[in-house]
Image (cartoon, rainbow, N blue to C red):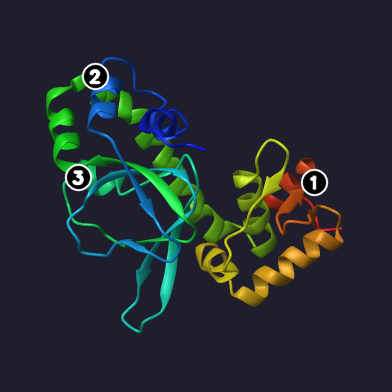
Amino acid sequence: MQNDPATILAASRFFTGVRQPSLSRLLEMAVVREFQRGQTIFREGDTCPGVFVVGEGLVRIFRIAPNGKEHVLHLVPPGGTFAEVAAIGGFCCPAFAEALENTRCALLPADPFARALRDDHQLCLQLLTGMAMWVKHLVGLVEDITLRDAAGRVARYLLGVADASGRVTLPSLKKHLASHLNLTSETLSRTLRRLGEGGLIEEDADGALLVLDRRAMSDVAEGIGPIV
């Protein structure tokens, strides 16, 4: 269980390039925040609280269209970050954030984080690695929507979130994952069923998914292999 900011930040790819003494400064300002399942963390237009780093749980970042339809922009698992762009840019939250599970985060408050960026040029340079990875992630999302079919999107997502054993814990409400992948809930369910029938995944006793054949899943993700 990740309880302290040092452990939470150490597991985050966004901060992998940060070295001492910059890291110590971040840890001095960090506070742990806990959110219950279904709790709103912030709303679109709120003043940005700072950079959140998920230690455990799952957070969805979403926008609401004028017609009331929600679209999930990002599902943030342990090790992931959110509100980092708003904190660095000094602007309001551009979306809503909600805990999909009981969630624990390390928060780097906006004001001391901004002061650290102004004072510590090495920190700015070190954070460029994390920002580059975030841009790569966004490019991947656009690529998924424009170049991959439903099977490719689902396969790529499962490969991206699977742990070393191939285990994937899906959000309790699959509609959030479907929205994130720009699919309908019915299409997501149908695609998961096809992957299961093809022997690429299976569901374990706890309801989690197991990726059985990473190579075949990679082929599906890249559109070069059919679902058997």
Q: Quadrant of residue 66?
A: bottom left
Q: Which residue extends farthest bottom?
A: 67
Between disc 1 and disc 3, the foreground one is 3
Above-or-below relation of 203 to 29: below
Residue 200 horizontal/vertical position (percent): 81, 52
The residue tagged 3 is 89
**Which amino acid does the dot numbered 2 rest on?**
Gln
Q: Classify residue 215 as left or right of residue 128.
A: right
Q: Nearer the viewer, residue 225 or 174?
A: 174
Total numbered circles: 3
Q: Earlier in the sequence, mark 1 or mark 2?
A: 2
Mark on residue 216? 1
Q: Nearer the viewer, residue 82 or 7?
A: 7
Above-or-below relation of 132 to 145: above
How crowded pointer 3 is (Cα within 10 Å; few <14, some 14-19, many 20+) is rated as: few
Mark on residue 122? 2
**Which amino acid does the dot numbered 1 rest on?**
Ala
Q: Classify residue 31 as left or right of residue 2.
A: left
Query: For the residues marked 1 and 3, what is the alpha-carbon distance in whole angstroms?
Result: 41 Å
Q: Classify residue 196 as left or right of residue 223.
A: right
Query: For the residues marked 1 and 2, what is the alpha-carbon distance in whole angstroms?
Result: 42 Å
How crowded pointer 2 is (Cα within 10 Å; few <14, some 14-19, many 20+) is rated as: some
**Which amino acid does the dot numbered 3 rest on?**
Gly
Q: Classify residue 111 as left or right of residue 36.
A: left
Q: Secondary structure at mark 1?
A: helix
Q: Secondary structure at mark 2?
A: helix
